[in-house]
Structure formats: structure tokens, C-alpha cells
Amino acid sequence: MKKFLIVGLGNIGEKYTNTRHNIGFKIVDAFVKEHKGNFETEKLGDIATVKIKGKTVTVLKPNTYMNLSGKALVYWMKKENILIENILVITDDLNIEFGKVRIKGKGSSGGHNGLKDIQDKLNSGAYPRFRFGVGSEYRKGGQVDFVLGEWSNEEESAMIERIPFSVNAVTSFVTAGLANTMNEFNGK
């Protein structure tokens, strides 16, 4: 049976719940709900396990804060014996227009501290990632405040469509593979 690890990146705590930096948490919450799963607090994060077409999918929301996400990812990857190509890390991206997604099989951290830590802990940039565009509508030097800021009303309204779209992309990664998912969802 093929096993997958889906990791939504974010920061724990009520004050971060509706921030741009927590889009990874928001997407995996919707994904788990869609597939009738429930999160439970386990070692280094909240974990849910769902079955999709005979595949076992472990979903992780690290509780290590963004900058230490790699520790939780590597722990659960080893515990569940999941291959690196069957991991999908979901995160925010300032370099992509709001609401657009970019799914890739490898790459750099792009300056994202969560991805940087994962890359360091895996000793590789060759793992699939799902970047959700949060845009770049911030003043010079205001990047941190922007990603830790809450969504605008317009962005919140658009999420009604963008979250289900993202859940479909994650489901496609599990059922149709990386290449098909990239072809169908990238840039949309």
C-alpha cells in the first residue's frame, strides 16, 4: 500500500490562525475534513490519517513553529516509513499572485524559513512542495508583518473557492501523481 505524508506549514497559537503564513494549516484542515478524518495531537504536531483510493495519507500540522518544521516532518516521515517523493509540503509564497498555486517536485527554499529548515533536515531540496500565492502587497521591509497579517476581506471572500481548489490539488497529488497534478493545477 502506498503511503503519503502531507505537511501543512503554519504557526501554532490563536493569534496566527487567520494569517497568510498559516495557509498550509488552512488547506490541510479542509483536506482532512473533506476526507472524513480528524486531527489528534501527537509528537511534534497534530496528525490525521485518511484513506484515499487504497492509499494511506498521514497529514501533519507541525507544532514546532514554522522555522523548525523540518524536525516534525523528518520524525513522521521516518515513523511512517514514507518515501521523500510521497511527501507534499504546503506553504505560503510571497512571489506568487494571491490565490494561484505552484506545485513542484524540487526547488530552493525561496527564502521561506519553514522550507529552509525542511531542506536542512532532509539534506535535500528534492521533495514535492505546494506553494499557495499570498501576493506581495507590502511596503519595503514589511514582509514579516505582511505574512503574519490577517487576510483582507477580498482575500477571505476568494478563499471560498481557492481552498476547495487547493484540496482538489492535494487529492490529485495522492491519486494522480506529481506530474499530472502540476499539469492540471499550476498557475491556476
Image: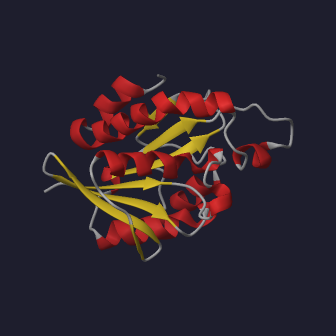
Classify the position of the N terminus by image quarter.
bottom left
Q: Nearer the viewer, residue 39 or 123?
A: 39
Q: Would residue 127 be visible to someone looking at this image?
A: no
Residue visible at 56% across and 69% down?
64
| Residue 69 % position (x, y) | 54, 63
Q: Nearer the viewer, residue 46 or 82?
A: 46
Judged left or right of residue 53, residue 102 is: right
Q: Would residue 152 be visible to someone looking at this image?
A: yes
Res 138 quadrant in image: top right
Q: Is residue 165 above or below residue 17?
A: above
| Residue 94 % position (x, y) | 66, 37
| Residue 65 % position (x, y) | 60, 65
Judged left or right of residue 62, residue 169 is: left
Residue visible at 67% across and 32% down?
153
Q: Nearer the viewer, residue 171 or 94?
A: 171
Q: Is residue 41 above or below residue 92?
A: below
